[in-house]
Image (cartoon, rainbow, N blue to C red):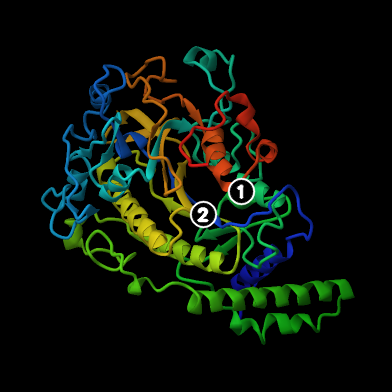
Amino acid sequence: MQNRRDFLKLSLGAISALSFPSFAFGNSDFNDYKALVVIYNGGGNDGLNTFIPSGSDANSGYQAYANARETIKVKNNSLELPLNNGELDLSSSNPYSSNDNLAKGYTKGFYLHDGADLATNALMPEIAHLFNKNKVAIVANAGNLIMSGTKKEFTSELKPLPPFLFAHNHQTKLAMTGEASTLNYNGWAGRLFDNWIDVNGGDIYGMNIAVGRSEHLFYGDKTQGLRINPSGPTSYNHLNTDIFNGLNDLEESEMFKRFFKKLKQHSFDMQTVLTEDWNNNAPDFSTFSAKNAYGEELFSSPSHEQLQESKPVLTDTSILKQLKAVAKLAYIGKNRGLKREIFFIYDGGYDTHNNQSNQHSRKLRGLSLGIGDFYKAIKEMGMENEVVSFNISDFGRSTGENGDGTDHAWGSNLFVVGDAVKGGVYGSVPNLILGSEDDLTKKGRLIPTISMSQYYATILKWFGVDDMLMKKIVPELKNFDTKDLGFMHV
């Protein structure tokens, strides 16, 4: 028996499929495949404990960082990555081991990188290893920013601040829309699909796919993204003899009946295609020669013994399921002949006002596990030059402590992963002394020196967005002298 929730899900899915007009905007004539994977760290990720300032400068180095957060600082302790034939091997050695205490491992130390003034948290050995192989770019102190400015310019209102700065919902929307000056409805990926409506030849998959929860990123004027459960497409076969058959007998106008008949057909066409592809045309990771850092099947959750952790703090491995689904969908998309895809992953739980060592530790460990496995899967499928993953968040967190946590702030450290990435650190670490000229308040709310507009534009240039279209997709890029941050091979 159908229920209202099933009906709404199916109706919305079909409306999404029906919303694709048959005409095109802009030039989207590609002969190659490329995909972006957007990982949203919901709640405001602490970029300073993800990538720790490790330099010796009195204002921007480790000591300035440590002075600002005595309780939750990562120790100034350089750790070694255990390697076997040049590859990360955690099967018999754990660099962050701290008596099975993940929270203590979180602050145990970091992995230094030659020539870089940011180091990677101990709980992220997979990401650290990829950085050392020049597959990761760390983008320092980025955030929602309308235009560059000084503390004096912002506080005296000579330069505009993003609306509702430090508020989760508003800053999330700004990060999704790619416009820091207005709470626009449309996401940058939605605008892009509006302009590239023909990019995948009208394929039922479209271009934008959310795995699990969706946000404003895919909202367009003429398009909207597809949403798929990480465990696979939802079947609605039980609706065949229920609600939609009843619609055929409604005493309404012919237009009404025709619309719902078309909606029904599109819904079942979509469900049939998605289910067939998921069950029969997706890769089987159990057959891959690549294994995770513990020597087991990709996207499998290591045991608590392997992770050397015990309750109450356990690694959050939910992102593994989402990245596994994206790897499947990217493979399916390329083999269907699609040219461009954008995937969205919602990874919440980063709002660490208190108990940060417990909460943030379980998120960072899971994130690193997922990125490591995803890169290996993409590489074995021969798509390592075609898929780029990157993270975004509401905002960063305060340099200063809030008890055993941190407060909402502004700038943060982000990362981009893939073979199309020029590895290294881009941008610079700001003055970390509380109340400095780089601190908007006295809490360590760092003024970004890189805008999300510049961050997105650098990635989208690789993705194939030309200068003319870039003005529509990232309209505030015109406010910045540097249009391309240089971390992509173009």
Answer with the quarter of the image where residue 85 lies. Answer: bottom left
Q: How many marks?
A: 2
Q: Are marks 1 and 2 in contact (CB under 8 Å)?
A: yes
Disc number at residue 426?
none
Disc number at residue 344?
2
Q: Is residue 387 left or right of residue 159?
A: left
Q: Is residue 490 left or right of residue 86?
A: right
Which amino acid is tagged 2? Phe
Q: Secondary structure at mark 2?
A: strand
Give the residue at mark 1.
189
Residue 366: x, y in percent? 32, 54
In this rendering, is residue 381 above or below 398? below
Residue 118: x, y in percent? 30, 32
Answer with the quarter of the image where residue 337 lies. Answer: bottom right
Q: Residue furthest bottom?
A: 241
Which amino acid is tagged 1? Ala
Quarter of the image that includes the N terminus? bottom right
Any part of residue 3 in sight: no
Q: Residue at x 41, y 39 (%)?
A: 414
Residue 291: x, y in percent? 28, 64
In this rendering, is residue 93 above or below 437? below
Of mark 1 and mark 2, the one earlier in the sequence is 1
In this rendering, is residue 39 above or below 137? below
Could you say which is closer to the camera, residue 452 or residue 296?
296
Q: Residues within 10 Å of mark 2 (few under 14, many from 20)?
A: many
Q: Residue at x 38, y 49 (%)?
A: 349
